[in-house]
Image: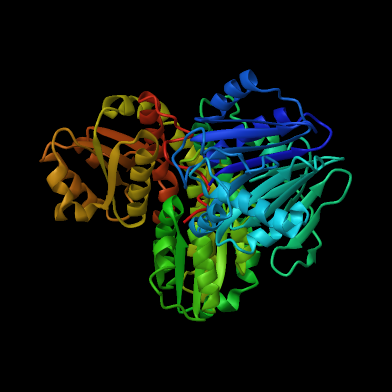
Amino acid sequence: MCGIVGYIGHREAYPIVIKGLQRLEYRGYDSAGIALYDGTDIKLSKTKGKVSDLKEKLENEISTSGTLGIGHTRWATHGVPNDVNSHPHYSNSGDLVIIHNGIIENYDSLKKELIKRGYTFKSDTDTEVLVNLIEDVKKNENIKLGKAVQIALNQVIGAYAIAVFDKNKPNEIVVAKLGSPLAIGIGEDEFFIASDASPFIEFTKNAVYLEDEQMAIIRRGKDIKVRKIKGDSLVDPYVQELQLNLEQIEKGGYDHFMLKEIYEQPEAILDTFRGRLLSSEAVIKLAGVEDNMKKFLAADRIIVVACGTSWHAGLVSEYIFEDLARIPVEVEYASEFRYRNPVITEKDIVIAISQSGETADTLAAIKLAKSKGAFVFGVCNVVGSSIARETDAGAYTHAGPEIGVASTKAFTTQITVLTLIALRLARAKGTISSSEFRHHLIELETIPSKVKEALESDGYVETIADIYKDAKNFLYLGRGYNFPVALEGALKLKEISYIHAEGYPAAEMKHGPIALIDEQMPVVVIATKKGHYEKVVSNIQEIKSRKGKIIGIVTKGDQSVKELADHVIEVPETIECLTPLLTTIPLQLLSYHIAVMLNKNVDQPRNLAKSVTVE
């Protein structure tokens, strides 16, 4: 979950590392630290708080000179967020310095053994245990740092992306990866290290993404040397050209990344189906599906595994796959799926969904499914991510970088990809006619412009937000395709405003939640014309008779709900299976505006991180 940055080269390291940490702060932001080395002394500064707090402290505390530097922005696991537990961490001798993303599960037994050998510890972290383990191996075996890292990591159980250096070898950084992402940027006589490529995109377009259980020794003036941690064999690193550009990771005039990403959705959805959807030819082209069509057509069922917002996208896909392609679907929380001894066979297709492509629980679910012989298809946003590499095939969403911790465009682009897959399978199975198929394609092509139209409600949504910003609870209701949207709307409000909110199928309201409704309870009801409209109107009447405050999300031109609701937000009309792409827009805006009015940190909500690389 943490963000790590490193630099070694001919430039001053500090400006690169501090800016890199700011770009990676979405990965964790409860504490931060930097270590710089000028060839003589290690200068280290760290603090509880955000990278801005670190910058202010560091520039008043230490010299920022040095062409080698490593930095860390933390999402706490072992040890509370404070100055001492912040990274980087020294070894006992003060010679080694480390930064670490992940969890060392057997740290306690390792720590007890190191204490017996005379080591002392200042922090509560597993990371300080790891750096002292490396030092112990290096000293006892009388070996170089790289070999010591390799031997130490073979004693470790858990997940990690690390960068470590020895002050006695000022031209070298050793890095390693298992379960947490690590990218190495390659420049002219300089190297960059980061959890993703955003910290170094203005310096180089060439990057190596380490695979699990690989380590690299990075030396100035030499090519990087990549080895397998187990087995010690050399690996020929694959250098790929980055597609990311600087403009994509800047706010572009918006107050927050989240608002920028909400407004990017028309273009993001278009980019998702660009080149894949050819309505004039009545064709969908998805190489990962086409190359494995026999497996899809022979599948007894599809199992979707995901977490959080991606799980909600999976719930939408359950309706789409079963409705259009007539394939049974089960949607599982990845964290539960892997621990409940699920029944998986070679006739199952497992679709794993993740924005980052690094979600630890989803990765573990993938490995479990593959071990049982299932075919695993990945849907993720980040090219070269762990899920992209671990799955048998897949499709990228092409949403572009999503920096805001509360996911928005990832949700709509995931639904877009899953809809394309369902339509392609429906056509191949003959469960949809050619005219229906073409109609769906034509309608999907109109969605970007309809999302733009839905965004025009922003001003009115802001007015509604001002009315209900002080509410203590919200209820979100939807039916059919829009039940998952209700769940997602409630999640967005919880994530960034810290207001308690729950999503329910509208018909379930009378089986318990209706007891909560009074004149203080705002109820958001998704009531589009497509799908169980009359039933939802009846549910709204039940709310109104109990004096609940009703915010209706309706199809443009609706009259029935307008007569009952306190507020009505209109979205354009579309076919039923595509309504989630439109109804989610006002819910994202509502959450955003309430959070801003409550003076919450919209892009970095408390206790959360964007990429959940721990269990």
Relative image position of residue 60 (x, y in whole percent): 62, 18
Relative image position of residue 32 (x, y in whole percent): 56, 34
At horizontal 36% and vertical 56% (from top left) the residue drawn is 481
In depth, the one of 499 and 526 nearer the eye is 499
Relative image position of residue 440 (x, y in whole percent): 49, 58
In depth, the one of 613 and 556 nearer the eye is 613
Res. 442 visible in picture: no
In this view, the residue farthest toward the left is 545
At horizontal 74% and vertical 31% (from top left) the residue drawn is 41
Left or right: 74 as drawn, with respect to 198? left
Colour scheme used in the picture?
Answer: rainbow
At horizontal 70% and vertical 57% (from top left) the residue drawn is 140
At horizontal 56% and vertical 42% (from top left) the residue drawn is 402
In depth, the one of 192 and 295 nearer the eye is 192
Instruction: Please say if 358 is above or below 45.
Output: below
Res. 524 visible in picture: yes
Relative image position of residue 200 (x, y in whole percent): 72, 38
In this view, the residue farthest toward the top is 60
In this view, the residue farthest toward the right is 221
Image label count: 0
Left or right: 97 as drawn, with respect to 146? left
